[in-house]
């Protein structure tokens, strides 16, 4: 049996931040309009730190190493035809914040707590030495080719 790979740097801290963030939005309702994932149409792209990009890529690698590319042109490459996110458990901070006007937040937007978690995430990225925010789509372009297939050496390097 092969040796178990050590977890990627910062992965436990990132998981803890995501867990706290999800708890803040536990009562949010989403209409599944997928507006947040129709990047070109609505003029936004999630910005991610490298540690987040690494986790999203690891999510793709676990489901076969290929981007689904099932949305319309300009949609997030991780969007499935069904409207679901193919890396839901590994989606970045921004995608977890229900910023879309279609969503309702019964408890109100808990800005201070979300901001505090965003600062924790930045501090983690700084500690890891990669605190530049990059568009998620650029991160995916670096790791996957035009057909959505992993550029193996690069993707592997970024997820280990
Ligand atoms: S990562 Fe997932 S939730 Fe975020 S924009 Fe892409 S498909 Fe949507």
Image (spheres, helix red, strand yellow):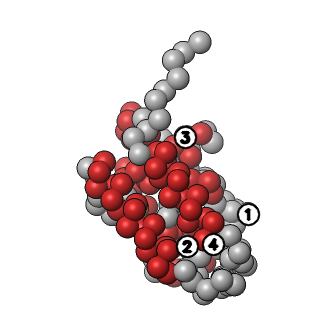
Depth check, mark 2 against mark 3: the one in front is 2
Q: Is residue 54 left or right of residue 99?
A: left
The part of the image, by quadrant, that contains residue 21 is bottom right
**Which of the pair 5/141 is nearer the observer?**
5
Q: Quadrant of the C terminus?
A: top left
Q: Is mark 1 within 8 Å of ligand 1?
A: no
The residue beneath circle 4 is 25
Nearer to us: label 3 or label 4: 4
Q: Is residue 91 visible?
A: no
Taking the spot 43% from the left edge, 38% from the top edge, the residue there is 8
Q: In terms of secondary structure, where does tag 4 sit?
A: loop
Query: What residue is shown with label 1?
Result: 82
Residue 7 location in percent, x, y?
Answer: 47, 35
Instruction: Locate residue 65, reporting x and y percent.
Output: 55, 40
- Is the residue marked by circle 3 packed among few (<14), some (14-19), or many (20+) residues within 10 Å? some
Which residue is labeled 2 in the image? Answer: 97
Residue at 29% in and 51% down: 127
């Amino acid at each position: 049996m092969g040796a178990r790979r050590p977890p990627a740097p910062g992965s436990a801290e990132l998981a803890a931040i995501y867990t706290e963030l999800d708890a803040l939005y536990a009562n949010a309702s989403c209409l599944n309009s997928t507006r947040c994932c129709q990047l070109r149409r609505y003029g936004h792209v999630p910005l991610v730190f490298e540690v987040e990009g690494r986790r999203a890529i690891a999510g793709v690698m676990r489901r076969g190493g290929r981007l689904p590319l099932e949305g319309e042109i300009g949609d997030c490459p991780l969007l499935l035809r069904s409207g679901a996110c193919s890396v839901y458990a590994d989606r970045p901070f921004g995608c977890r914040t229900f910023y879309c006007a279609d969503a309702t937040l019964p408890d109100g937007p808990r800005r201070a707590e979300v901001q505090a978690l965003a600062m924790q995430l930045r501090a983690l990225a700084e500690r890891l030495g990669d605190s530049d925010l990059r568009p998620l789509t650029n991160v995916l372009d670096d790791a996957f080719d035009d057909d959505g297939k992993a550029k193996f050496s690069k993707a592997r390097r970024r997820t280990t």
